[in-house]
Amino acid sequence: MSRNVLLLPGDGIGPEIVAEAEKVLNKVNDQFNLGLTFDKALVGGAAIDATDSPLPDETLEKARNADAILLGAVGGPQWDSLPMAKRPEKGLLGLRSNLQLFANLRPAILYPQLASASSLKPEVVSGLDILIVRELTGGIYFGQPRGVRELENGERQGYNTYQYTESEIRRIGRVAFEAAQQRGKKLCSVDKANVLEVTVLWREIMEDLKREYPDVELSHMYVDNAAMQLVRAPKQFDVIVTGNMFGDILSDEAAMLTGSIGMLPSASLNSEKQGMYEPCHGSAPDIAGQGIANPLATIISAAMMLRYSLNEEKAAEAIEAAVSKVLDQGLRTADIMSDGGQKVSTREMGEAVLSAL
Amino acid sequence: MSRNVLLLPGDGIGPEIVAEAEKVLNKVNDQFNLGLTFDKALVGGAAIDATDSPLPDETLEKARNADAILLGAVGGPQWDSLPMAKRPEKGLLGLRSNLQLFANLRPAILYPQLASASSLKPEVVSGLDILIVRELTGGIYFGQPRGVRELENGERQGYNTYQYTESEIRRIGRVAFEAAQQRGKKLCSVDKANVLEVTVLWREIMEDLKREYPDVELSHMYVDNAAMQLVRAPKQFDVIVTGNMFGDILSDEAAMLTGSIGMLPSASLNSEKQGMYEPCHGSAPDIAGQGIANPLATIISAAMMLRYSLNEEKAAEAIEAAVSKVLDQGLRTADIMSDGGQKVSTREMGEAVLSAL
Ligand SMILES: [Mg+2]
Ligand SMILES: [Mg+2]
C-alpha cells in the first residue's frame, strides 16, 4: 500500500523547516517500511509569485489526492498589500474548506527540558500534555447572517451569528472522543451553556455521544472557567473539545503556557482522517533564509501526521523520542536557547534528530 | 451634600464580609468627612426566603435611589432547585438591567505580598495592576435572535447573535478611555476584527473615540492573542476594553493570574456613574457563618466605590493603603494563607484594616 504525502514548504522559513522534516520522514519511511511517497507543491506567497494564485489548481489537485499534507508556513510583508482574496493566507483557508478539514488538533506540550521557558512556575507546567480539539469550519467565524446594518434610528449595528448544527457538533465530538481514547481517556467539553443556546445544544450532543465511548470520562466546563483553569492548573486536562472561537482563544492561551511556540505542532483533519499538518508558529519572514529557524515544530507535526492520518503510531513515537533526545543533549535553536544550551542551526537540529532516530 | 450607599449583604459569606466593609466605610466617612449615609436591603436567596422574590420592589427602589451599592454575594445550594426566574442570581441580573449597569470594571491586581499565590513566576506577575473594562449588558449574551431551530433536513441548529450598536460601543469606550486617563493612560481594545464584522465596527468606534482622548494611547489586539499575552507578559497592559463575552473570558483569566481571587473587587457602572460594587468571589456557602471568609475583596470593592461612583479618590487610596499594610503585617485569612503568615478570622482582618486606617 503506497500512501502519498504532499509537502507544501510555503513562505519565509517554511522551505528551511520543511526540508528538515522531509529528511526525518524519509528516514522513518525506510526504518519502518512505511511505503510513503512524497510530492511537493506551491502554496501562499510562493504560489502567488509563480502563478498569481495562493492556491493553484495543481496544488489543490495534489492536495485532494494526498493522504496527508505537511505545510511549513505562509505569508510575508511582500504580499501584505494584496487584496484580501489574493493573500497567502487564502491558500490555507482554501485547502481547509476544499478538503473539509473541520477538526483542528492543537497539542500544548511542554518538554521538561524547556520548562524554564514558560512564564508559569515549573511545578505548574512541567510535563504538560494537553490536546485541544477545535472545530475549524463552523461556528461564529462562518455563521450567516453577518455584517454591519443600519438601524431605524440611523445608527449602525454590527452582527455575527454563532451557530452549530447537530451533525457539525457530532463529527467534531467523535474526533475528540477518539483522541481521548488514544490518550488519557479524559475529555472536557468547553461551552457557555449557562448563557448561549448554541452551546446548550453542543453540550447535549456531547452527552449523547458519551454513550458510544464508555471508556472516556466526559466533563463540561464554561469557557471563562476554562480560561482560568488553564492558568491555575493546566495539567488537570487531557483532551479539550470546543467550538471554533472558544478553541481559537483557548488553544492560543494553552500554547503560551508552554512558553515555546517554536515547539508546537497542529493538525487539521477531515472525516476520512485526511489531514494538513503544520507548526503553530508563522513564516517568520524576519529570520527567513538565515538557517536559524527551529525545525522541531514541523518535525513534530510530521510525527502527528504519522499518528493521525497514516496510522503509524510507532514511527510517530520514534520521531518524538528523537526530539526529546536532542533536547536532552542540550541542543537549542535561538528561539528556545537558554543558559547551558548549545546553540545550533536549523540544519544542525534536523541532523541531530536524524542521528537520534 | 449627602450621598446614599446601599448595602446588600446577600447570602453565604455575604453578611460577614459586608459587615467588615461597612465598618471600614464608616471610619473613612468620619475621617474624610464624606457625608455618606447607609441603608441596607435584601437580595438573592435572603430576599427569596423573606419575600419570595430575589429582587423585592423595596430593594429595587432603594437601589434606584442610591448613589452606589455594595454587594456581598448571592446564591447557595438551598435555592438551586428553584426555577431559573426565581434564582438568587436573578437578583443581580435584575439590578444590572434596571439600573443599566453596562460597564463592568474588573481589576486584576497582585499585591506583591501575595505574589507567591500565583501560578506564574513572581517576576512575571509581581506588581500586576490591570483594569479590564467589560461591556455587560449587550453583545452575544443578550443578542436576538437566539435559540435552537429545526432545519429543513430535520436536524437541529443552535444559534446566537453577537451584536453591538455604535452607541453601545461608544459608551463603554468612554468609560474605558476615562479610566485610562485616571491610570497609566494606555488602553488596549480587544476584538476579533480580522474575522467578525461586529468587532470591525467596535474597532472603528474605538479609533473614532481616540480623538477625544489625545492623552490616552490606544492599541488593538485580537482576542486570541490577548489570551496569550495575558499569560506571557501581563504587565504590558494598563486598561483593556472589550465586549461582554471576550470580557467574561479575559477578566477571569486575568483574575486567575493573581492566584488570589479572594482579593479582587469589581464594579458595574451606568452612564451616571451610579454603580454596584462586589467581590469577584462568590457566596462560598461551604464556609458561611464560620467567620473565616476573606473580607478584603469587599473592602477593596468599597474603595473602588469611593473612587468611581463617589469621586473620593483620597478615601479610596487610604483604604487600599490600609489593606496593603495589613498584608505587610503578615495577616492572612485562610484562603490566602502561606508559610510565615499569621492566620486571622474575618473579623480580625476587618479590625486590622480599621486600625491601619
Ligand atoms: Mg488564534
Ligand atoms: Mg465569568
Image (cartoon, coloured by chain):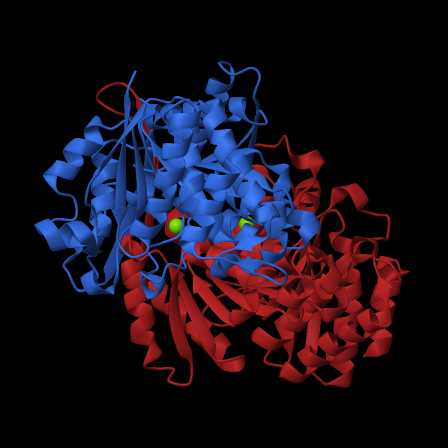
Chain colours: A red, B blue
Of residue B269 and residue B68, the one placed in the foreground of this image is B68
Residue in the foreground of this view, choosing between B343 and A308: B343
The residue closer to the viewer here, A273 or B140, is B140
Place residue A201 in its image quadrant.
bottom left
Residue B356 position (above or below residue A224): above
| Image quadrant assignment for residue B144 | top left
- Tell me: residue A259, above or below residue A161: below
Task: Quarter of the image for the N terminus of chain A: give it.
Answer: bottom right
Relative image position of residue B150 (x, y in whole percent): 19, 58
- How many labels sit on residues? 0
Instruction: Point out residue A352 in the picture as x, y percentages from the top left corner.
Output: 86, 70
| Residue A35 visible to the viewer | no
* Residue B70 in the image, given as x and y percentages of width and height: 32, 38
Q: The C terminus of chain A lies in which quarter of the figure?
A: bottom right
From the viewer's perspective, is B144 left or right of B263? left
Residue B339 seen in the figure? yes
Residue at x 58%, y 57% (from the top left corner): B117
Res. A145 image quadrant = top left
Q: Position of residue A209 (x, y in %)?
A: 33, 75
Q: Residue furthest left?
A: B51
* Nearer the observer, A202 or B317: B317
What residue is shown at x 63% (from left), y 40% (from top)? B235
* Depicted A313 relative to depicted B110: above or below: below
Residue under the image location 77 percent in, 82 percent down: A30
